[in-house]
């Protein structure tokens, strides 16, 4: 295979192919490099590259909706990542560990969505729950956990606690913001999730026919309306697109209109 003497460059090429939507070629390269590394004697650096290429292989299989193969690749990734994470922890490099942990969370979410697409509710919820345990602010993991039940069961009966947890997480957010042209929400330093994705799930949570309690439906409607209102304000230019700046500005706004107060 071309470039096998420099596997890091092959990983970069795979990423380029994915970005260009040349998914079939990306899949072939990822499979070949993964197989080569899995069957080779590895050092720390090659173990790191193995995790990288297995991550790309899982992603491209997910994008191509090859669920069985994607699940298999995700299991291999989990095994390789466990070894790699153990070495990172031993190095006591907190910055590197923090970044690797965030990638592990994203891996778990992708694996959960793969399992959901395979119709395996319990397995998908297990991955999403583990991601949430590692990052309680991860909106996508919570959204996907609800979406998995909806996809497989056709309703949201039994999802009361999951929906409540999502609503509480969204309430901790500074609100809707636009980052790199994408309208989304996030909490703290967790990844941004598009409002389109969030509203897709909230619309289900507002659907009387899906089996959620009335109180949860009403609370979901309020959050949906709040998000839509913030989107309208940003689109019209009436609110800062940076949610954290907007929140800071709001905190400086006096709770009393002193001009009105002094005239009374």
Image (spheres, grey):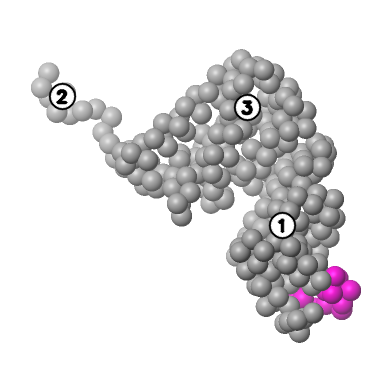
Q: Nearer the viewer, residue 153 or 78?
A: 153
Above/below status of 37 relative to 243: below
Q: Is label 2 in contact with label 3 (beta carbons under 8 Å)?
A: no
* Quadrant in the picture for residue 128: top right
Which mark's residue is nearer the viewer, 1 or 2?
1
Image coordinates of residue 101 in percent, x first then y, are 67, 57
Q: N-terminal of the two: label 2 or label 3?
A: 3
Looking at the rendered structure, the secondary structure element under dot 2 is helix
Q: Which residues are magenta?
A: 35-47
Looking at the rendered structure, the secondary structure element under dot 1 is helix
Quadrant in which the N terminus is drawn: bottom right
Give the overall secondary structure of the magenta segment: helix
Q: Is residue 77 left or right of residue 241?
A: right
Q: Single out the residue that lies furthest toward the right.
A: 39
At 74% across and 27% down in the image, what residue appears? 154
Q: Is label 1 in contact with label 2 (beta carbons under 8 Å)?
A: no
Q: Nearer the viewer, residue 78 or 151?
A: 151
Mark 2 lies on residue: 260
Image coordinates of residue 171 in percent, x first then y, are 51, 34
Which mark's residue is nearer the viewer, 2 or 3?
3
| Residue 121 visible in this rendered orientation of the protein | yes
Q: Is residue 94 left or right of residue 184?
A: right
Mark 3 lies on residue: 204
Mark 1 lies on residue: 59
At 57% across and 37% down in the image, what residue appears? 198
Q: Nearer the viewer, residue 88 or 11?
A: 11
Q: Is label 3 in contact with label 1 (beta carbons under 8 Å)?
A: no
At 72% across and 24% down in the image, what residue appears? 155
Looking at the rendered structure, the secondary structure element under dot 3 is helix
């Amino acid at each position: 295979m071309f470039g096998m003497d420099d596997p890091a460059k092959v990983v970069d090429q795979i990423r380029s192919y994915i970005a260009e939507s040349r998914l079939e070629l990306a899949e072939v390269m990822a499979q070949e490099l993964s197989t080569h590394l899995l069957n080779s004697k590895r050092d720390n650096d090659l173990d790191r590259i193995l995790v990288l290429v297995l991550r790309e292989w899982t992603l491209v299989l997910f994008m191509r909706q090859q669920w069985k193969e994607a699940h298999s690749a995700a299991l291999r990734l989990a095994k390789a990542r466990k070894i790699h994470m153990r070495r990172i922890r031993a190095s006591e490099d907190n910055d590197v560990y923090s970044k690797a942990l965030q990638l592990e969370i994203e891996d778990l979410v992708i694996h959960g969505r793969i399992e959901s697409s395979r119709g395996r509710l319990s397995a998908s919820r297990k991955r999403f729950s583990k991601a949430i345990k590692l990052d309680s602010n991860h909106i996508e993991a919570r959204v996907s956990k609800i979406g998995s039940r909806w996809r497989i069961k056709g309703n949201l009966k039994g999802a009361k606690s999951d929906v409540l947890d999502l609503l509480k997480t969204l309430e901790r957010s500074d609100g809707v913001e636009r980052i790199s042209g994408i309208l989304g929400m996030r909490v703290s330093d967790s990844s941004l999730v598009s409002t389109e994705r969030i509203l897709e799930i909230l619309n289900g949570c507002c659907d009387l026919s899906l089996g959620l309690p009335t109180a949860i439906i009403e609370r979901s409607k309020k959050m949906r309306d709040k998000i839509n209102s913030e989107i309208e304000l940003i689109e019209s230019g009436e609110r800062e697109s940076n949610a954290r700046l907007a929140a800071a500005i709001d905190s400086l706004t006096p709770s009393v209109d002193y001009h009105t107060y002094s005239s009374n």
